Image (cartoon, grey):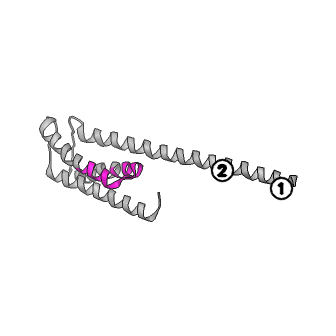
Amino acid sequence: MAGGVAAGLAADVAADVAGETAGRMATSGRRFWVATAALSVVTHLAVLYWPSVTVTGPVSWTDKAVHVLVFALPTYLVGRVVGRPVLVALLFAAHALVSELTQYLLLPGRTGDPWDVVADLAGVMLATAALMVGARSGRW
């Protein structure tokens, strides 16, 4: 009987330790995603609102690829942290228009480009699709 009680107590302690470890791992995983999302938003804002951008050499499509990435990454990361991909997508889509208008109207060293808005929205759509697929597959 004493062996049964001891075994039960040991099992309870092991379960508590495992639960605590899993909880810490979940918390540290969440912190990672929150920190990464915050860093992506800061980078996003810096890229869009830096007063002057000097680019040398051929730019052609690379500018649009940067716009896709600058909107896709924070949309995905913030959407994953918040857990409401449609709401996050709507906010970043609105910001695509606001950022280009701000560059055009308020930042003398910058210009607003309607094609940049298209690239920004493409990034938002790609990230939203990835979030929806991830949520449906139960990955997070």
Does residue 108 appear to the left or right of 19 in the view shown? left
Q: Where does label 1 land, which residue?
A: 4
Q: Residue at x 28, y 58 (%)?
A: 125
Q: Is mark 1 on a helix, strand or loop?
A: helix
Does residue 89 appear to the left or right of 52 in the view shown? right
Q: Residue at x 20, y 36 (%)?
A: 52
Nearer the camera: disc 2 or disc 1? 1
| Image location of residue 95, percent across then percent down | 23, 46
Q: Label 2, label 1: how many angstroms apart (C-alpha)? A: 21 Å
Crowd rating for badge 1 (residues with CA inside 10 Å; few <14, some 14–19, many 20+): few
Q: Where does label 2 land, which residue?
A: 18
| Image location of residue 132, percent across then percent down | 37, 61
Q: Is residue 61 visible?
A: no
Question: How many numbered callouts?
Answer: 2
| Image location of residue 124, percent across then percent down | 28, 54
Q: Nearer the viewer, residue 54 or 35?
A: 35
Q: Which amino acid does label 2 sit on?
A: Ala
Does residue 113 appear to the left or right of 15 in the view shown? left
Q: Is residue 86 visible?
A: yes
Q: Residue at x 30, y 43 (%)?
A: 44
Magenta region, main secondary structure:
helix
Q: Residue at x 27, y 48 (%)?
A: 91
Q: Give the range drawn in magenta.
A: 75-93
Crowd rating for badge 2 (residues with CA inside 10 Å; few <14, some 14–19, many 20+): few
Whether 81 is among the magenta residues is yes
Does residue 121 appear to the left or right of 41 in the view shown? left
The label on residue 93 is none
